[in-house]
Amino acid sequence: MPGIDHYLWLSSILFCIGVAGVLLRRNGIILLMCIELMLNAVNLLFTAFSTYYQDSAGQIFVFFIMVVAAAEVAVGLAILVMIYRNTKSVDVSIMDKLKF
Amino acid sequence: MLSYLFYILGGLTIFTALRMILASNPVHSVLYLIATFFLISGQYLLMNAQFLFIVNLIVYAGAIMVLFLFVLMLLNLNKETEPQKSIKSKFTMVISAGILMITLLAAFIQNQHDPASLPLTDIGLVKNLGRVLFTNYVVPFEISSILFLAAMVGAVLVGKQKNEEMEEINE
């Protein structure tokens, strides 16, 4: 079995790939997907530490993160569909109309 | 043996995640993200977290990614129409994400952790986790169901077309 260090490295690399995706891309749907990737990196680390300390609270917390992620995706995609209907694009850079 | 499996799974996970953010076609991005979720599920199985393995497969790789793919097809975005950022701003963003990664990894190298491998436990089995969930965490569980209901109503409310638009389409 690999140690806790390996899981720390793997999840921080995955999290930073998610951050890079959010910064690089302009498609709103892919932005949401990158947020999902970041949540998954955190879930992996939660599970690794839960196994490390033999405490099931971490895995319960992962379950609740999944619940929140599913709700977030449902509402986020509904908002994106609405934006597409009004502007014919899911480019996030056109959503700066509130900017002064 | 399990260590090799970890390295293979981890390397493939990083590869598919990178392909996900670099693919120019959004449908390829979704497919690479599904592969990433499958590989992360493999990591859960490696830690003997069987409940999370199944839930990750069903909820993430199943439900959520189908939702993404469905919206992508519905909006007809499966073409490479995304406008690109300028090279300069892309360079800046990759550098900033890389600096974050170097900071995190440096912090982990600084702190010496237990080099021993993870213990093999059975706390992640469906039976044990279900018992904990429905004894100690039953109130958060019920509150999360209310959150789901609110999200469902909110999604329908936000995504609903107005009546005038519907009449225009029908005419």
Image (spheres, coloured by chain):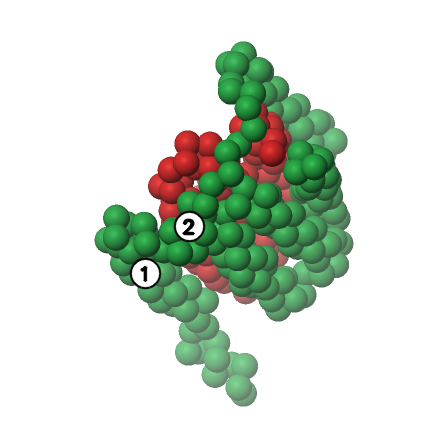
Q: CA distance from mark 1 to mark 2?
A: 12 Å
Residue A32: horizontal and vertical position, in percent?
A: 55, 49
Q: Which residue is mark 2?
A: A63
At x 45%, y 67%, the residue is: B159
> Which quadrant would residue B16 be assigned to in this image?
top right
Supply the letter of whichever chain is red: A
Q: Position of residue B139 (x, y in %)?
A: 24, 53
Pick whichever, B101 or B11, lies toward us. Answer: B11
Q: Which mark is residue B84?
A: none
Question: What residue do we see at 55% from left, 24% from top?
Answer: B116
Q: Position of residue A36 (x, y in %)?
A: 54, 47
Q: Chain of mark 2?
A: A
Q: Which numbered marker is on residue B145?
A: 1
Quadrant assignment, res B95: top right
- Circle 2 SS class: helix
Quick check: do tags 1 and 2 share a chain? no
Q: Which residue is found at the position 74% from the left and 31% from the top? A: B87
Q: Amino acid at mark 2?
A: Phe
> Can residue A97 be seen by looking at this rendering?
no
Chain that is green in the image:
B
**Vertical placement of B139 versus A41: above or below?**
below
Q: Nearer the viewer, mark 1 or mark 2?
A: 2
